[in-house]
Image: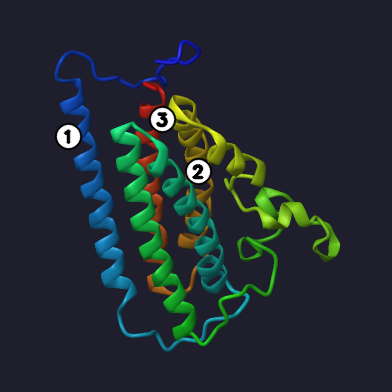
Amino acid sequence: MDPQMTPAKGSTAPSGPDAPARARTRWVVFAAVVLLTALVSFGLGRLPAERESVSDTGPDAGFSRDMQAHHAQAVEMALIIRDKSANAEIRAIAYDIATTQQHQNGQMFAWLRDWGLPQARSQEPMAWMGPGTAGHGTTLSPGGRNKEAARLMEGMATPAQMQGLRASAGAAADRLFTDLMIRHHQGGVAMATAATRLAQTAKVKNLAAGIVKAQTAEINALEELRGRL
């Protein structure tokens, strides 16, 4: 364990000769929960296209576009760490994140197509959440002149942080990944929570609720894992 780090409050790090087995069992159970959530959302998301009118600037379209971009960075981080980490738990959760979020991106892409809407956004990121939420939780200046803020959404890593992850190695890479992914998931949960409240279509609400549940579980697992690195 990193001498600078202590387990998160309330965490119970496995110990004893059977600790690796217990850790693997916990991740198997966790992966099953994530897979079940994905399968349920898949069944809901591929129902025949809803006929209600979906606004190009409304919360359903805005969430579908922004969460695709948000997920894409999580998938990239997961693939980076899975290729370099020697930690079996890190590699397992990275695989789960990559496969689940790629699948969800396919759903949201298909929804926009079914609604007859473009994949590209016509407004600032997160504008669908209401005033003061566009661009990494900051209020954009008139005309969207805060370009750096507009490129980021809640929890997303900066280009410098992504480069740091690519350049890191060993235990330092594992720790950086967990730090970045915890924050990334916290932002994703905030966005999905807003969608459960604001979305007009049942499938967006259902997927958003599934994201809140799955990513909250992943945050807890990552925090416990981070305390043992």
| In the image, residue 205 above or below residue 138 | below
Indicate the amino acid at tag 2: Gln
Indicate the amino acid at tag 3: Glu
Q: What is the number of the mark on residue 223? A: 3
At mark 3, the secondary structure is: helix
Viewport quadrant of the N terminus? top left
Alpha carbon distance from label 1 to label 3: 17 Å
Binning the other alpha carbons within 10 Å of mark 1 as few (below 14), some (14 to 19) or many (20 upward) gives few
The x, y position of residue 200, in whole percent, is: 48, 73
Indicate the amino acid at tag 1: Thr
At mark 2, the secondary structure is: helix
| In the image, residue 110 above or below residue 147 | below
The x, y position of residue 47, in whole percent, is: 30, 80
Binning the other alpha carbons within 10 Å of mark 2 as few (below 14), some (14 to 19) or many (20 upward) gives many
Alpha carbon distance from label 3 to label 2: 12 Å
Left or right of 35 on screen, residue 153? right
> Where is mark 2, residue-wise?
186
- Front residue of 108/172: it is 172
Which residue reaches farthest top? 3
The x, y position of residue 179, in whole percent, is: 50, 33
Question: How many numbered marks have been drawn onto this rendered protein structure?
Answer: 3
Q: Earlier in the sequence, mark 1 or mark 3?
A: 1
Residue occupying image coordinates x 52% and y 45%: 184
Left or right of 227 on screen, residue 122? right
Q: Answer whether labels 3 and 2 touch (C-beta < 8 Å).
A: no
Binning the other alpha carbons within 10 Å of mark 3 as few (below 14), some (14 to 19) or many (20 upward) gives some
Q: Earlier in the sequence, mark 1 or mark 2?
A: 1
Residue occupying image coordinates x 47% and y 16%: 5
Residue occupying image coordinates x 47% and y 83%: 113
Q: What is the number of the mark on residue 25? A: 1
Q: Answer whether labels 1 and 3 touch (C-beta < 8 Å).
A: no
